[in-house]
Image (cartoon, coloured by chain):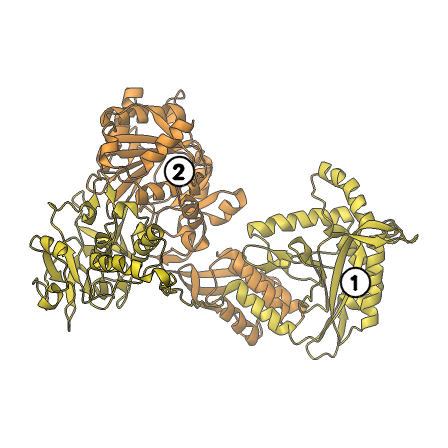
Amino acid sequence: SLKNCIWLSCVLRTPKACFWSTASGGLIIQSVSNDVYQNLAVEDWIHDNMDLEKQQVLFLWRNSPAVVIGRHQNPWQECNLRLLRQKNIKLARRRSGGGTVYHDLGNINLTFFTTRKKYERMENLKLIVKALKALRPQLDVHVTDRYDILLDGQYKISGTAAKLGRTSAYHHCTLLCNADKFVLSSVLKSPYRGLKSNATPSVPASVKNLFEEDPSLTSEILLDAIAKEYAVQHQIDHHITLINPADEILLPGISNKTKELQTWDWLYGKTPKFSVSTCLNMAYKGSVLDIKVNMDVKHGRIEVCNIDLPEQWLPPGLYSELVKSLTGSKFCPNETTTLAATLLRVCPQDDELHSRWSLLCENMIRLM
Amino acid sequence: VCIHRVRSCGSIRFIKSKYVCVFDKSALKFSHQQRLFRTSAVSCGQIVQFKLSDIGEGITEVTVKEWYVKEGDSVSQFDSICEVQSDKASVTITSRYDGIIRKLHYNIDDIAFVGKPLVDIEIDASKGVASEEDVVETPPMSHEEHTHQEIKGHKTLATPAVRRLAMENNIKLSEIVGTGKDNRILKEDILNYLAKQTGAILPPSPKAEIVPPLRKTEAVPAAPKDKARKIPVPVSRPIAFSGKDRTEPVTGFQKAMVKTMSAALKIPHFGYSDEVDLTQLVRLREELKPLAEMRGVKLSFMPFFIKAASLGLLQYPILNSSLDENCQNVTYKASHNIGVAMDTEQGLIVPNVKNVQVCSVFDIAVELNRLQSLGSAGQLGTSDLTGGTFTLSNIGTIGGTYAKPVILPPEVAIGALGKIQALPRFNGKGEVFKAQIMNVSWSADHRIIDGATMARFSNLWKSYLENPASMLLDLK
């Protein structure tokens, strides 16, 4: 409704104290979008623009299938990028730290926004556990000191991450209601070998859905229960305001934030420096060649590239052209494919040469 | 953040006497309440050790993950300095000062300690913002609300010089929209605001003077004197253009283009253009589109253009050949692998449809659909991108009529198709009718292809498209 929009618009702007004499200590908002980039952009927007001194915010959101890696992680190490591309599952990098998670509509995300001073993760997780127990007293759920929530003492149902800025902070966590565990385990298994880096590694854990424990639980019921508990603890109305992440008028600058989260430079370019040291096993004319490959990748681009080919397997000029082209290029299958195809145009038209070239390039592309 | 050690060459002191005489009486009444200090020292900057502040939750150490600045960079207050991580929390550390970074105490992946120095910042002199100006900070009791760091519930970011400018002109900072980083209010914002108020473009306030009220009182008596004269032209303030050149290395797609085009340059090109009347083809496609859709395929004009080209190449196979490096041998390619130039986010790519000579128009449409969806997803394979023998570029989908396409080695010919326009033409009876006209521009390798061959091929291709029924006769 228009009234709701105007009210919400005022709430999201930084209000003056006198206007908010009736205002409460909290606000609960839920996203109408299932797009992971839009929802992450809302988190950024609130973090950058809202004054959380007078009121804290709880943001509820769900995403269509996506793999979300932490700020300082390496996507090649964390997930099966090839499978993601095939299955059209999105890859997102969030701004908070921590490990990699798989989202789908059976997973709910909760973000607790506070001022930097009031940042307190344990409190938030205890709130969630309290809500769950109030809903289903028989549930065996508890918070660990690693800020996970465990079901039956062994299955992880929630993971946590946080982002702290100058004046504001947020703590967000997942909650597995009814996610596809099969897809989850297959996409979170990386096929890439020989990667060495200081990127934050994920700690794998056995997971379980709350739905498996109690089939009467749905995402909606859980969201509502948690919102209710938040409302009680912050002494506010149990009212969830819907928010549209595409609304540029309500959230000025949001579309830029959404776009930035999808750029190659953010998704892959922010990967901490890593090296690839592996062996290509190429079957060629009845024999198998073992080709050692060493690459250094910085900001997602190949800084150094060494391919240990048998002598004269490729004309030396062509080999050096390949290495020269790869250096500085993105560590990306699409980029490498184009480069390989283009270089083929300017070398001698020889079938034998072409098949060797294609074989080598296909194998190199598989590394990415 | 606390200051560990401040080496200051200039300490807090009162303003020099040369400024006092310029003060208006009205400004002076505040002076005894004000605390004035120099922000700049003349010969040395104050190096401040900026310590890592408390993260919360009893955390004592973090890992430095990314630096946003390097030694020698200048930073402003609230600029991000680095990103650190502790136990699943990523923290952005921002600067408290304006200044120049003099030393980074940690490398990436080092452990940093809370309470220990993170960076050394030289609190600076030469920025031009506060240099040789005195910064006036009024105590909280002052009724000048807008000089506060934070209006209740509303944060305004502005450097001290900007605040002073606002105060001088009786502007509330809360009413200005900041255009700087983090919505910081810049000097330009104040000046623009003022310009809107008075309708004039103001000159920048000279640094030595402090008193606008003095100027105003002077201006008023001047006006009646000048009644007879024209209105003085406001002094326009030169807008400082702060754009900077940006140099990037040529990599990836661009590098590939450079390679291809450099090789193409070696080919002596000649061009040949013509006009094609697609009126009948347009009608035919309209009829066939729903049929194709029923089979789950989007039918554009390209499958027709491609098939017609292949039929033409059967008659003029030299256009589907390749010249070796020394120009000693010409290889006539058996397959018609017709490339279709595609514009993607990353740039121009040219996947090809294999063996068009044995494909039906529908087969070509299916293959084009496949290539287009892979192309937009950035998932084309090497086999799709190599082995082309002839290329068509449909630049007309973006616009344009005539083009001068560049041959993609090792091919010897290429065609660029302009957009289809409805234009008036004369028919056989001399009547004007509405025709759907498209222009085609061919380029060919003049070392082995002559103009006549190109013209005849083009005429044949054109005749197939102008009279699609004739394609039926020659379809294999």
Image quarter of the N terminus of chain A: top left
- Please report, as a chain letter, where disc 2 is located: A
Compared to A230, does B127 lie above or below? below
Q: Residue at x 28, y 37 (%)?
A: A15
- Please report, as a chain letter, where disc 1 is located: B
Which chain does yellow denote in the image?
A: B
Q: Residue at x 35, y 24 (%)?
A: A224
Q: Is residue B77 left or right of residue A286?
A: left
Image coords of residue B145 (percent x, y) = 18, 45
Q: Quadrant of residue A189?
A: top left
Image coords of residue A252 (percent x, y) = 39, 43
Q: Nearer the viewer, residue A68 or A42?
A: A42
Q: Residue at x 76, y 71 (%)?
A: B331
The lab-note entry on whether marks 2 and 1 share a chain reads: no
- Spatial distance from mark 2 to mark 1, Cα to Cα? 53 Å
- The type of residue carrying mark 2 is Leu
Q: Nearer the viewer, residue B252 or B418?
A: B418
Image coords of residue A257 (percent x, y) = 40, 47
- The type of residue carrying mark 1 is Asp
Compared to B410, does B356 lie above or below? above
Q: Residues within 10 Å of mark 1 (few under 14, many from 20)?
A: some
Rendered image: mark on residue A250: 2
Q: Quadrant of residue A132?
A: top left
Q: Quadrant of residue A254?
A: top left
Nearest to viewer (mark 2 / mark 1) = 2
Q: Is residue B49 left or right of residue B314?
A: left
Which chain does orange denote in the image?
A: A
Image coords of residue B473 (percent x, y) = 89, 51
Say which residue label 1 marks. B274
